[in-house]
Amino acid sequence: MLEKMSDFFEARLDRYDEHMMTDIESANEFYPFTARQLPTAKNSLILDLGCGTGLELQEYYKLNPSARITGIDLSQGMLTQLKQKFVGKEITLILGSYFDVPLGENVFDAAVSVESLHHFKKEEKIGLYSKLHIALRDNGYFILTDYFSLSDEEEQMHRQNLITLKAAQGITDDEFYHYDTPLTVKHEIEALIEAGFTSAEVLNNWGATYTVKAIK
């Protein structure tokens, strides 16, 4: 049965960190790698889309303890756990969808998202990435680490499976339900470029998990 996105993660809080670090292949490599791509300048302003419990931040604070973070997530439980982890850090936490939350203009030095954006269509992402592009400062950039479909056929299969499941369960609203529908890397990069980023390139990958850097 499909679950609404926020309900899915609220129900799995107790095991979330353990699951991500032990059940997701190469997580012990891609979290530190992602953190190393973020700015190390003192007081850097960073936006974290789908911050969860802050697994990427655990690594980033080792490199830049003075960083100022704005984290957005749908799960209040995850935001509570994140806040408990980083007592004394300058963190602004926002409960909501990053599709709906205003991000401002020329605010952030960089943005990051890890294992969060593989649930959405290309068209939805273009709108989000356009908003993100505006929110970044000149020469700002976005680091995306996520897993991707390895072919157009796989991407289409995931999307069709979601449509079939929603129809079977009588779901007709526009709320987000938890079901993985990853794009291909090619389509992800196309979305970033269409949103206004001047370049987007793959920095590394671990199987189907890739890190992409998009520069404003």
Image (spheres, grey):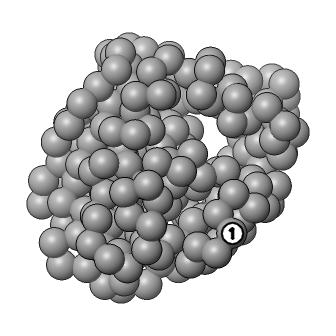
Image location of residue 165, percent across then percent down: 73, 24
Q: Is residue 209 visible?
A: yes
- x then y, percent, for residue 35: 37, 49
Q: Nearer the viewer, residue 67 or 169?
A: 67
| Residue depicted at 62% across the width and 18% down the height | 23
Measuring from the top left, give residue 132's x and y in whole percent.
Answer: 37, 68
Q: Position of residue 202 (x, y in %)?
A: 20, 36
**Residue at 35% in and 15% down:** 207
Residue type at numbered disc 1: Val
Q: Is residue 27 above or below residue 105?
A: above
The residue lying toward the viewer, choosing from 78 and 7, is 78
Q: Is residue 47 left or right of residue 142?
A: right
- At x 51%, y 38%, the residue is 115
Q: Quadrant of the C terminus?
A: bottom left
Residue sitting at the far left: 198
Figure quadrant of residue 39 = bottom left
What's the residue at 53%, 51% (across, down)? 58
| 185 relative to 84, above or below | above
Res 34 quadrant in image:
top left
Local crowd size for mark 1, using a 10 Å CA cut-off: few (<14), some (14–19), many (≥20) = few
Specify the quadrant that holds the N terminus.
top right
- Visible residue check, residue 91: no
Disc 1 marks which residue? Answer: 87
